[in-house]
Image (spheres, coloured by chain):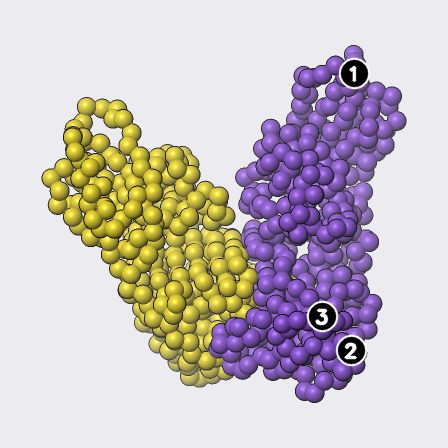
Chain colours: A yellow, B purple
Amino acid sequence: MRVAILGYGTVGSNVAKVLIENEKIIKARCGQSITPVIALARHAKKDALIPITSDINEILNFKDIDVFVELMGGIELPFQIISGLLKRKKNVVTANKALLAYHRYELETLAKDLAFGYEASVAGGIPIIKVLKEGLSANNIINIKGILNGTCNYILTCMQQVGMDFHNALQKAQELGYAEADPSFDIEGQDAAHKLLILASLAYNLDIKPEDILTQGIKDISSEDMYFANEFDFTIKLLGIAKLKDSNIELRVHPTMISKNKMLSKVDGVMNAISIVGDVLGESLYYGAGAGGLATASAVVADLIDIAKGNFKTPMLGFKEKLEFNLLKPEEIYTKYYLRIKVEDKLGVLSKITLLMSQNLISIESFLQKPKKNNENYTTIFFTTHFTYEKSIQNLLRILKKQEFVKDEPFMMRIED
Amino acid sequence: MRVAILGYGTVGSNVAKVLIENEKIIKARCGQSITPVIALARHAKKDALIPITSDINEILNFKDIDVFVELMGGIELPFQIISGLLKRKKNVVTANKALLAYHRYELETLAKDLAFGYEASVAGGIPIIKVLKEGLSANNIINIKGILNGTCNYILTCMQQVGMDFHNALQKAQELGYAEADPSFDIEGQDAAHKLLILASLAYNLDIKPEDILTQGIKDISSEDMYFANEFDFTIKLLGIAKLKDSNIELRVHPTMISKNKMLSKVDGVMNAISIVGDVLGESLYYGAGAGGLATASAVVADLIDIAKGNFKTPMLGFKEKLEFNLLKPEEIYTKYYLRIKVEDKLGVLSKITLLMSQNLISIESFLQKPKKNNENYTTIFFTTHFTYEKSIQNLLRILKKQEFVKDEPFMMRIED
């Protein structure tokens, strides 16, 4: 089987490396050699393992290519290229989550009986696409909760375990190459939202856009939140959450307080993990490296081996017939909440806040106020609530912001215990 | 697709239940209905969801059955039955790990281009067979470490976290239905050895028998071992371990001290988990319910859906061409060890023991002796060693047993940190 690699960066070069160095096990698995014959790169690469061209037309029309691997990044250009390839009956493998977040259904429709693999698009080398498409296929998926962004998980681990503040943790992540120079796509949650959307499509056949997902990043998390989490046995993780409620789906990406006894709370550093609850199996969890050239190559090459075996009969994101689910509006989210409110330290404030909470039908589950260590006129109070509606919490936050005794914007985090 | 179920116990009845209750999602996944039409049971079942027969010939020759699901248990009888079915070109799904531990290669040879599914044979509903066959197919598997027996994991969790002794923990497991009346198959490690063997075959194409695996159970673990583990930040787990060393494979099932910071050490109660290190991906881990009617049915039905999709092109335990690996002899195992030795509390004993250790080229990594709390003449000393050969440890244990100052048999546990 002859493969062309569109994009010879960290992932592309590792795909070539794995195909060459692990030829023996790959051939044993699928009964044939999988040969990377040419790669596309803007510039010549020193020490490239295979011939490189910078001419897109040359590679698209290269002789006898069975599978094209798209690792270029971007959205519209790879969409045009892959559409063209599928129309010409060429198999395609991609690791491009942004592309899938916007064009997965159009591409799967074009792919039909061709192979269109994207195992590498979510959670790097963890075979989570296969797990949802095939491994858990007997289950109605009750929920998915995923640590899908290693950058955020690394930063949050530094903050909670080492006591760094957000900016120091981000800087350390950048020094180690775990965060980009412009980290906004990761820390604002968009990257995780793209991945969550792909997983939710595999679970619920959900054809929506990333913009439809409630998405909140991690940059407003403070050392005080970490203090509270440690005191109350929570770990703070950026989670992508999909939940089935009747025939509606709740989809959201946000920093989340989760109980320390959950397996997800034990996933540290740059690692990814996805917990899936099915109605038949109950909870299962999948853990591993979510990024990096080799981990991503592991998934790309697994797709190539499946193609070589003829093992690719799951079009339309794992569904042969359509399921109908609706996306729940954000205000209808029903969960538990954490609140951090900085207030004037004076008579009657707590009474006013708790009255506002009860007027909004928000019931308090736990409460913390520390004695002040300085002479400020302000103190920070912390609440967790029983289950309530997002609408009620948003309403409370709006009202709190207007109170003269509230300093700074009150901060809210959702809880999954 | 019409399915016959051979064996209508906890798993069989749940397979029927899932096929009926989750018909909508199953049909959406594979484009057709999967209908359980008849089941085999010794006696009529009240409230059975599908017709029952006690006549094996009736069910084997039932009209238009596409797939037979074997859930009878035993080894030779199901082997004969499945062989007969495969020769008649019938697809088969089984959850029978003992059958696979002895006859997997013969059955896969017979299956050839037919579907022969056994996702349910290891770790219940965790799709670990698919992960090894397909998800990690680009990797040379460096090692597999699995918590494969929920009964043992439940008992060990009770011992380490609640402080129960082995017999009380076993009794509690029996009361809760987690252990059989005769628990020996679980607690002596054979069940885990069968499962490890199936995983090792999928990783290394290894055609050996369960008896070839070094297997040690959990019944000699004492409260003192748990005390030491807690003091030195270890968790004690029964692990099935497969390791690649050059072209040799180390295979072993035994209670193991693992560092508390490893994900595997965080797997409590009846849950199963398998950590796999691949040369491309690094470590990934798979966690979930390893037993129970519904969890097992989740895997059986996933196989049925794959068959309905025509997604079953991975014969010979995931290999199309043979790989050659040799099983390493137990005495060549090279790892770290924990030793508990009960000795007379008198002058010169420690010096004698440490001399014996150095004579056997065993280097000490840590050491613990507690002040005695009673007037016994004996005290217990604990060691952990640096990496050494199993042969050296076994030799040391033989010599120690003969010393007049050693009371009771010295106890050894292997360490994976």
**In the image, are marks 2 and 3 on the same chain?**
yes
Tell me where residue B86 sits by quadrant: bottom right
Residue type at the position of mark 1: Asn
Judge whether A202 appears above or below B252 on screen.
below
Which residue is found at the position 17% from the left and 39% from the top? A352
Q: Is residue A169 visible?
A: yes
What residue is shown with label 3? B7
Q: Is residue A81 visible?
A: no
Which residue is found at the position 42% from the left and 48% from the top? A417
For disc 3, the chain is B
For disc 1, the chain is B
Element at badge 2? helix
Which tag, 1 or 3, sits closer to the chain's start?
Answer: 3
Residue type at the position of mark 3: Gly
Which residue is found at the position 38% from the left and 64% from the top? A245
For disc 2, the chain is B
Tell me where residue A323 sits by quadrant: bottom left
Q: Position of residue A261 (x, y in %)?
A: 48, 43
**Total marks placed:** 3
What residue is shown with label 1? B377
Q: Nearer the viewer, residue B216 or A249?
A: A249
Tell me where residue A72 sits by quadrant: bottom left
Q: Nearer the viewer, residue A391 or B398?
A: A391
Q: Select label 1 or label 2 by which is in front.
A: 2
| Residue positioned most to the top | B347
User: Label 2, label 3: how many angstroms apart (C-alpha)?
Assistant: 10 Å
Left or right? Give the position of A331 relative to A108.
Answer: left
Judge whether B280 appears above or below A226 on screen.
below
Left or right? Give the position of A381 relative to B219.
Answer: left
What residue is shown with label 2? B56
**In the image, are marks 1 and 3 on the same chain?**
yes
Left or right? Give the position of B295 relative to B411.
Answer: left
